[in-house]
Image: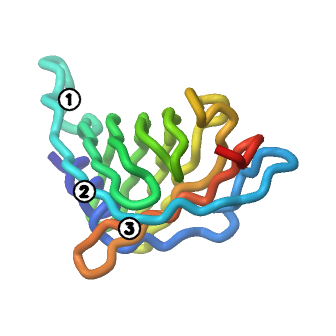
Amino acid sequence: MAGGLLAFALFLSPPQIDPAAAQSVPTQGAAMSHAIGTFDVQITPIAAEADASAEAHGRLRIAKTFHGDIEGVGLGEMLAVRDGSSGAYVAMERVTGTIDGRSGGFSLVHRGIMDAGAQTLLITIVPGSGSGDLIGVSGVFHLTLADGEHRYDLEYSLPNTAP
């Protein structure tokens, strides 16, 4: 599945963040915080529909376990396409667990582009998707791969920073 190859390339290669695109989206009047840690990820291909063309986008399931300032899981689905050294992926992911002692959940939207090998990646919290103690959360999820380990820095804000 060609789309699956792009998904792995974008997830397993150190992404180049486009500074213009990766601007934080803070909640008005709230201070920015950082949740830092690692995560394990499992990406599983989803079988194509029986009537799908051979050139259809690849579909993949995402399952993550977060460690560090986020303790919880992320579950989502990805669409990906690749042609040689260029391609793209988009994904929606729901994260549930605790962040710095606050329990709840939020959704992430992923956008990854690879153009002749150069990569940009932007992962942001979907506005209005927070639940539980994370209602009103906003921000940007920065992902890196170092020494074979997936690392994150969630730059986020909440309307009230006291847990």
The residue carrying pointer 3 sits among few (fewer than 14), some (14 to 19) or many (20 or more) residues within 10 Å by Cα, namely many
In which image quadrant can residue 131 be found?
Answer: top right
Residue type beneath disc 3:
Arg
Q: Earlier in the sequence, mark 3 or mark 2?
A: 2
Kind of residue sitting beneath label 1: Ser
Q: Amino acid at mark 2?
A: Asp
The answer to the question of whether label 1 and label 2 lie on touching residues, with beta carbons closer than 8 A, is: no
Residue located at (40% from left, 70% from top)? 144
The local secondary structure at tag 3 comes to: strand
Distance between the alpha carbons at the discs numbered 1 and 3 = 36 Å
- Estimate how packed mark 1 is, as few (under 14), some (14 to 19) or many (20 or more) residues with alpha carbons within 10 Å: few
Relative to the observer, which residue lies in front, 24 or 3? 24
Residue at coordinates 42% horizontally, 36% vertically from top-left? 96
How many angstroms separate mark 1 from mark 2 (CA)? 32 Å
Compare residues 112 and 155 and report the one nearer the observer: 155
Q: Choose mark 1 or mark 2, whichever is in front.
A: 2
Mark 2 lies on residue: 40
Badge 2: residue crowd in 10 Å (few <14, some 14–19, many ≥20): some
> Which one is nearer the viewer's eye here, 151 or 67?
67
Is 16 or 48 nearer to us in this picture? 16
